[in-house]
Amino acid sequence: MSAATRRSRQAKRAAGHTASADPTTYTPNFAYRGGREAEVYCEGVRLSRIAEAAGTPAYVYSRASIEGAYRQLDRAFGALPHALCYAVKANSNLAVLRILARLGSSFDIVSGGELDRLRRLRVPGKRIVFSGVGKTREEIREALKYSGASGGGILAFNVESAAELDLLVEEAARHVKAGGSRAAVAMRVNPDVMAGAHPHISTGHHHHKFGVDWAETRRLYVAHKDSRWIEWRGITAHIGSQILSVAPYRQALARLASYVRDLARKGIRLEHIDIGGGFGVRYTKEGALAPADLARALAEMMRPLGCRLLVEPGRAIVGPAGVLLTRVLYVKENRGKAFVIVDAAMNDLIRPVLYGATHAITPAVRANGSFRGARKVDVVGPICESADFLARDWPLAPVKAGDLLIVWTAGAYGFVQSSNYNARRRAAEVLVEGRRFRTVRRRQSCDDLVRGETV
């Protein structure tokens, strides 16, 4: 077979793959509009218009998508006593958090910095759970003092070790003696359930750093049953991220339910079970985890327990709601290998490098209603690393310098994981609301990069 024939067949396969995986068919509130030169709109705004105004790289979020995803998940659990505790780590932009706070969302945080963001929005403490394997004394003190808009402490500290519990008890004693209330606590038990799309995002197995074995967890609950400084509020687990099946959740919840019954026999009655998050979404060909299927399975197991269910979705709410815009700088070919060099890089979106994640990438303009002539290319950035890529062997229609590309499903773990590597400025963030858009985080300046440094 000649090289020309191989390239022709590869192009046909790539074209077919691209056509069958048009991200607008599974991404709410994003769509191609127009005739021969169809462009992608987010709600009522052309993405090319946003790129012209905000520059590239830029993250763009759809308010309608965020609100729709939250409401769909909330409705799925229906009358079952529950709280959706949005995982702030997925996307911590204040504008995004404000949208969710106004919807009545609760929040899951893992740092004092995330707590400060909620404080700025006056989120009530009763709507905050504090997770994380390495809380500092200062963070614990700040969380104990937190009240938010309506007074009262936070909903629960999710404790991940005996040593952390000792520190929390010590600080809670000081807090109570100063006139504060007892700390509400849940232990994070490790249910020894394997789940997650990549080893770096699996968290529920015994060899992971998260949580405590049940035998040790049980001992701690009993030892602090009558504490003057803390009160047992619940029990929690988190088994991984980008989970696409209900089965791991059923397995984890079955174990948590048995632990709740065991503690009840010891006179320790818990108010809630926190099953964590990790609900998977579609990036390219995956089947997203249906909220209705998950809610139905968990509700059947929760009702007999008489406990409130807490879930911690992050990606499922904001992942499909965001895209990354980037422009083509150059196109080149080395011995048959094609490279599309763009102005976004691994410092802007590290998921492909860190997790081996695949994000669909398409041109913002679709000529003649299709992506004809697609061939497999590496979409790479300007950073001085061989690992700097957004996609490898991705089928992409022919593009040229100046063309606008869209990296899809980038609303979660995109900007929040970005950095200033190679002294690159972090991207702008833009929120679309109907026919209007606004910059909700400006692009960093060079002065921003050196602020705080001294010579």
Image (tube, rainbow, N blue to C red):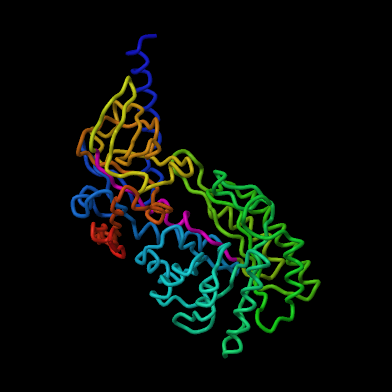
State the image quarter where residue 224 is shown.
bottom right
Residue bounds of the magenta highlight: 310-328
Residue at the far front: name it.
Answer: 455
Task: From this view, report whether residue 394 is shown above or below residue 73.
Answer: above
Residue 323 image position (x, y, % from top left): 34, 49
State the image quarter where residue 389 is shown.
top left
Residue 297 image position (x, y, % from top left): 64, 55
- Looking at the rendered image, the quarter that the C terminus falls into is bottom left
Viewer-nearest residue: 378 or 102: 378
Viewer-nearest residue: 247 or 315: 315
Residue at the far right: name it.
Answer: 265
In reply to whether residue 327 is colored magenta, the answer given is yes
Task: From this view, report whether residue 250 is shown above or below residue 228.
Answer: above
Would residue 217 be found to the left or right of residue 98 on screen?
right
Tally of numbered tags: 0
Which residue appears at 62% of the width and 73% of the height?
Answer: 167
